[in-house]
Amino acid sequence: MTLRFNYRAVSPHVYQAMVNLQKADSASSIDPVLRELIKIRVSQINGCSFCLDMHAKDLLKLGDYQDHILLLNVWREAPLYSGRERAALELAEAVTRISEQGVPEAVYKRVREHYDENEYMELILAVNTINSWNRIAISTGMFPGCFS
């Protein structure tokens, strides 16, 4: 594993734009635990080891969520996730894989059973934010501990 370059140093304006996006995401009404679950699940799908490592550790700082992390890849079969969490995770997967089938109407309806329109948009923001971070990390060769 080799870091291609430190994008923060090379393009501080790009980094600042991402920080601003992250601030908007963090200011939303999404529960912090759910936000971390979304970040972890999206990072699993995208194969981003840097973000997966970071957000798993961030979730553990919020409490005893080890089982949530260990079973996240099979959340559909794990009974510990709430209906709200399941709906958000399903949306996160659909948006992350949007080129495959968009966001199917059935997914949208399940999400809307738990979230209003504003919350739906906040979920989309959370998913898009971590997808952007993943793409930066993967494209620049970031890996856990690369900035240590």
Image (cartoon, helix red, strand yellow):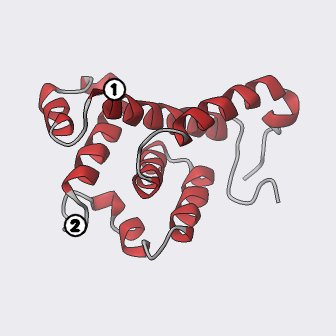
Q: Residue at x 24, y 25 (%)?
A: 101
Q: Residue at x 41, y 45 (%)?
A: 30
Q: Is residue 63 left or right of residue 134?
A: left
Q: Nearer the viewer, residue 123 or 53?
A: 123
Quadrant of the rendered structure where residue 127 is? top left
Q: Residue at x 44, y 76 (%)?
A: 64
Amino acid on which disc 2 is placed: Ala
Residue that badge 2 annotates: 78
Q: Position of residue 120 (x, y in %)?
A: 31, 32
Q: Nearer the viewer, residue 137 or 64?
A: 64
User: Which quarter of the rendered picture does the C terminus lie within?
Assistant: bottom right
Q: Residue at x 55, y 42 (%)?
A: 26
C-alpha span from label 2 to label 1: 24 Å
- Vertically, is 9 above or below 55? above
Residue 96 visible in the picture: no
Q: Position of residue 8 (x, y in %)?
A: 81, 36
- Vertically, is 121 above or below 79? above
Q: Is residue 144 left or right of residue 43?
A: right
Residue that badge 1 annotates: 98
Residue furthest out toward the right: 9
Q: Secondary structure at mark 2?
A: loop
